[in-house]
Amino acid sequence: MGAKTAVSVEQYLKTSFPDLDREYRDGELVERTLPTFLHGKTQLHLGALFAAERRKFPLHACAETRMKVRPNLYLIPDVAVFYPDAPGEVPDTPPLVAIEILSPDDRLTAVRDKLEECRAWGVRHVWLVDPYSKRMYTCDDGLAEVRALTIPELDIALTSSAVFPNS
């Protein structure tokens, strides 16, 4: 992490990176930590859980999608879920849910800052999932460990056995 390069928003939005996409913060490209197999497996599984819920609700899940939080801030949540409408190509309205999945090289302070930025943007449900310890957290006023990740308005509850099956 940490390699930063000054570029315009227009350049950023037209750039594809050969390895892992970068976030954009006030003119700088910010590298993200490389995900591991367990990170990717958890990310895919969470996406599948929300895809299954589409039978009941108009949920639109995506993974690693650039989102315009403000004019000079583009974040890339590991998983985001929009409801009830699908967003545009580069979402500029908050999703219902934003999920970050920890990787071994993540710095908790950086992850916490990103989660707080999502909350400030207006994301109603901001979650942190740690596939290594099989722990789940919500981000409201700080991080709080929970037994289930819930979306009360849709009566959805994801328990740890649902999020981490046979890990």
Image (tube, rainbow, N blue to C red):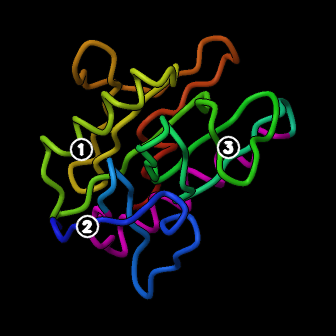
Q: Camera-side residue: 1 or 80?
A: 1
Answer left or right for 39 relative to 85: left
Q: Which residues are magenta?
A: 29-54
Location of residue 147 by image quarter: top left
First-in-chain label (2 vs 3): 2
Q: Secondary structure at mark 3?
A: helix
Please tell me whether residue 9 belongs to the stretch shown in magenta: no
Answer with mark 2 or mark 1, whichever residue precedes in sequence: 2
- Which label is found at residue 50? 3
Q: At numbered mark 1, what does the secondary structure look like: helix, strand or loop?
A: helix
The numbered dot on residue 111 is: 1
Which residue was labeled with disc 2?
Answer: 33
Task: Tell me the crowding category of disc 3: few under 14, some 14 to 19, or many 20 or more residues within 10 angstroms, Cα based.
Answer: many
Say whether marks 2 and 3 touch (CB < 8 Å).
no
Q: Amino acid at mark 3?
A: Phe
The quadrant of the picture occupied by the C terminus is bottom left
Give the prevailing secondary structure in the magenta stretch.
helix
Spatial CA span between label 2 and label 1: 11 Å
Is residue 60 positioned above or below 24 on the image? above
Q: Residue at x 42, y 51 (%)?
A: 164
Crowd tier of the residue under label 2, counting other residues whose Cα lies within 10 Å: few below 14, some 14–19, many 20 or above: some
User: Relative to 163, is 17 above or below?
Assistant: below
